[in-house]
Image (cartoon, rainbow, N blue to C red):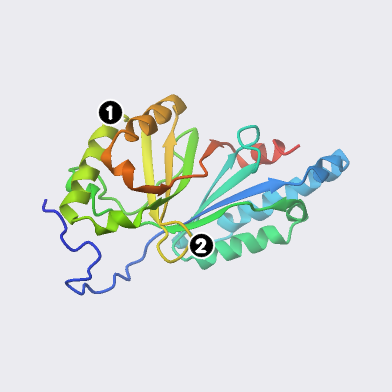
Amino acid sequence: MMVDLDPSGQVTQREPDRAQRQFLNYAFFKLDPAFRRLPQSEREEIRAEFLAAAQGWVEDAPVEKGLIQRPYSLVGVRGDVDFMLWRIAFDVREFQEAQGRLNRTRLMGYLTQPYNFVSMNKRSQYVNRVEGSGHGLEILPGQGKFLFIYPFIKTRAWYDLTPHSRQGMMDEHIFASGPFKGVRINTSYSYGIDDQEFVVSFDSDHPQEFVDLVHRLRYTEASMYTLQDTPMFTCVKKDLSEVLADLG
């Protein structure tokens, strides 16, 4: 396949794409330790109320809405967040509905949200040249035992490169990633809808493989054009009841 010489559509005045896409929301929560000083019976009641509200967002919705929610625990992994809800929907307003349900629970009186990322899924201009890669537009989340997440911003100099230069660097990037079959990447785009340009998440059962992958990619030319790729989150996939039990 040829290199896209007008990836932004600026020269050809490409018509806007209004096809339905998935929106992604990575919502991180931190617990106030005051919650743990409540009587055990009250904590159990509050956790059960939150569990019902969170699960109800998916269970009460028609199937055609395509709502997806995956819970993860970060207890003992990071100090500034305790758990994360990965939400996916075809309408960004569904995330407001999800959060509104949680806000009406007592547990939210003990929770803050240090991070909350919003992004959108779309076809990559780089990986579509590689046979068997990048052809799907729908994300299948939560395939691995772990999810590694970080917001990502390129330097402005990246966008000043020629399309052939960028494609060459990304071809090297894709080639370097090739042996790491146990890591599945989910790249989503935040241009204009959140502070970062991308949110990148990786499903895997093997943290050691992900560490080696990121290490190898540091040696690629494209990494020279990274402006920001932190904070980085290691999320452990669990049932929401287990996630809440980790809170104490």
Q: Earlier in the sequence, mark 2 or mark 1?
A: 2
Q: Amino acid at mark 1?
A: Pro
Residue 168 % position (x, y): 18, 45
In the rendered image, is residue 57 in sight?
yes
In which quadrant is the C terminus drawn?
top right
Q: Position of residue 53 (x, y in %)?
A: 67, 55
Look at mark 2 in the image and give the residue it sits on.
62
> Which class describes the residues within 10 Å of circle 1: few (<14), some (14-19), or many (20+)?
few
Nearer to me, 57 or 147: 147
Question: In the depicted view, which residue is nearer to us: 104 or 7?
Answer: 7
Position of residue 29 in the picture relative to residue 87 (left or right): right
Please tell me whether residue 94 is drawn above or below residue 43 in the rendered image: below
> Judging from the image, what secondary structure is the residue with disc 1 in?
loop
Rendered residue at 38%/27% (across/down): 212
Q: Position of residue 152 (x, y in %)?
A: 42, 50
- Which-is-in-front pick, marks 2 and 1? 1
Please state the horizontal and vertical placement of residue 2, each as a whole percent of the image.
11, 53
For residue 136, side relative to residue 243 (left or right): left
Q: What's the residue at 11%, 51% (across, down)?
A: 1
Single out the residue that lies furthest toward the top: 208
CA separation in Å, label 2 and label 1: 40 Å
Left or right placement of residue 109 versus residue 90 in this view: right
Amino acid, disc 2? Pro
Q: In which quadrant of the rendered view does residue 42 lie?
A: top right
Q: Is residue 232 above or below residue 206?
A: below
- Residue marked by disc 1: 179
Q: Secondary structure at mark 2?
A: loop
Local crowd at mark 2 within 10 Å, few (<14), some, or many (≥20)? few
Q: Report the number of numbered marks.
A: 2
- Which mark identifies residue 161? none
> Taking 77 as reference, is 177 left or right?
left
Name the one closer to the observer, 105 or 116: 116
